[in-house]
Amino acid sequence: MTGHIAMALNTLFLDLNSYFASVEQQVQPSLRGVPVAVAPITSDSGCCIAASYEAKAHGVRTGTRVGEARRLCPNIAIVDARPRLYVVMHNRMLRAIDTCIPVDEVHSIDEVSCVLDRVQREPARARELAVRIKGAIRAMCGECMRCSIGIAPNRPLAKLATDMQKPDGLVVLRDEDLEPGGGVLANLSAQELAGIGPKMMKRLEYAGIRTIGDLHARSASELRSLWGGVLGEKWYHWIRGADLPEAKSKKGSIGHQHVLAPEVRSVEGARAVAFRLLLKASSRLRHEKHAARKLSLAISFTSTDPSRPAAAWGSAGKDGDGFSESAALGDGCTDGATMLDALGVLWERALPLVRTRTPLLVSVTLHELVREESATLPLFGGERKDASVSKAMDTINQKFGANTLYTANVHDARQHASGGIAFRFVPNLGHADSVQARQRETASEAGSRHLAKQGARSSSGQGAKERARSDAELEALIEASLR
């Protein structure tokens, strides 16, 4: 890039390190410095959704089965996931960053980006800002809440920079770092760039492209051809530091998935959970003022082949050995009755497979979303009544709590599928059925509270009952961990 005008540092990207595990280490001091994995189901068949750096050192990763994690690291602490706690901490993190710079976009529960102003674009000022952000997060969220910050001319490169130094990293990418012959990016795998997945990487490798330097050596037209569209041409400019506008993605689907607890890995249990997931998704659909044109059901099963691993986290119906089908919902549906009928049809199609296998993961998704005002209004009185009933149920549940009013077919699954956190989606705590309305406190926390109340000095936790925590208590739990 010699001879070119220097590229401005436009974007600061922040990635919280090992987020769920770090939150647990923050609020449970006994877990600090200890290998930790977070899982929705803590039995051996469960799946780790986060691992601390101490656990990663033993080979435990996101997606590792709990039983395998215990084999790799016998002294690992498997912690029951507490999604609402993680959302509460996320909101604190946003407030902390906002004391230093406005958050431009939330990309996921643990990733945000900020736009630098003309003063902040100067490299020394940008570094100073990053250090202040780290300090603000440490002060408001806790010492365990480390983050990696990348600063670069555009968001794709700033995100890449956060992966170059973990944990607690700070990387600034300048013009010289983007040079194809000797820059720090040249020898990195092209798959390090967010958005280049395994399938795209295979296509690039077939064309002789393995590194970012190899990408840099190709023309804009070559990359456009490889990607089959304008996105390839955008990558040509992004890796050179151009700050091209990125189209805001439209909401294309709303859905939920759930790893089944052992007691509901049956035909009846899986069916109840599927309908519970649909009620959650349809309520959220209406809360966000959307309508859906398609519904899909996906189910994955435990493996009958000992040499083959069970379905991976998030892989319902994707492994070729599960069930995945869709049903049309018309020009835009919001009423729960129509959706429940459609799911019932899909369930009947899945039934022969569910009867012969053990269901492990159920996923229900509403697709092809349109804004509610753009949907075709129901023509018949019965359809209009169903839509009104669904909205009335939402109103009651919003006022009195999730599952105050529900359909009979989810009665046995009310305590299941209580809410998790999907990639690129941060639950809205204002929605009654977003994530668990209350979070269990751990046995040790319950014991400490019980014994403190009794004036005892021991904190073994024996004999203390677990109880639910309110959002205010979750905030207080975080506050207490700062002292």
Image: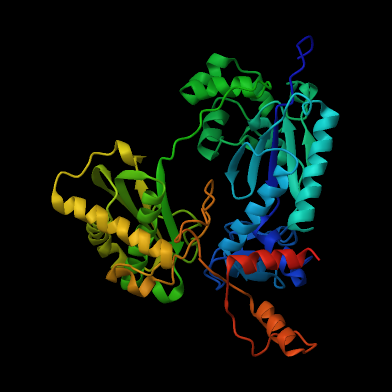
Q: Which residue is situated farthest in the top direction here?
A: 3
Q: Is residue 276 found left or right of 224 in the rendered image? A: left
Tell me, yes or no, if residue 161 can be seen here.
yes
Q: Residue at x 60, y 22 (%)?
A: 244
What percent of the width, then of the height, locates residue 119?
Answer: 79, 26
Q: Residue at x 66, y 64 (%)?
A: 475
Residue closest to the eye, 163 or 168:
168
What percent of the width, then of the height, locates residue 230?
Answer: 49, 21
> What count of labels does the image hold?
0
Q: How is the image coloured?
A: rainbow
Residue closest to the eye, 224 or 30:
30
Q: Is residue 416 found left or right of 197 in the rendered image? A: left
Residue closest to the eye, 449 or 330:
449
Position above or below: 94 against 207: below
What percent of the width, then of the height, locates residue 21?
Answer: 67, 61
Q: Quadrant of residue 209?
A: top right
Q: Is residue 212 found left or right of 3 in the rendered image? A: left
Q: Is residue 45 found left or right of 69 in the rendered image? A: left
Q: Quadrant of residue 165?
A: top right
Position above or below: 326 against 219: below
For the C terminus, give its image quadrant.
Answer: bottom right
Q: Quadrant of residue 28?
A: bottom right
Position above or below: 252 against 324: above
For the N terminus, give its image quadrant.
Answer: top right
Residue closest to the eye, 277 or 173:
277
What percent of the width, then of the height, locates residue 204?
Answer: 56, 29
Tell me, yes or no, if residue 25 can be seen here.
no
Q: Residue at x 15, y 54 (%)?
A: 382
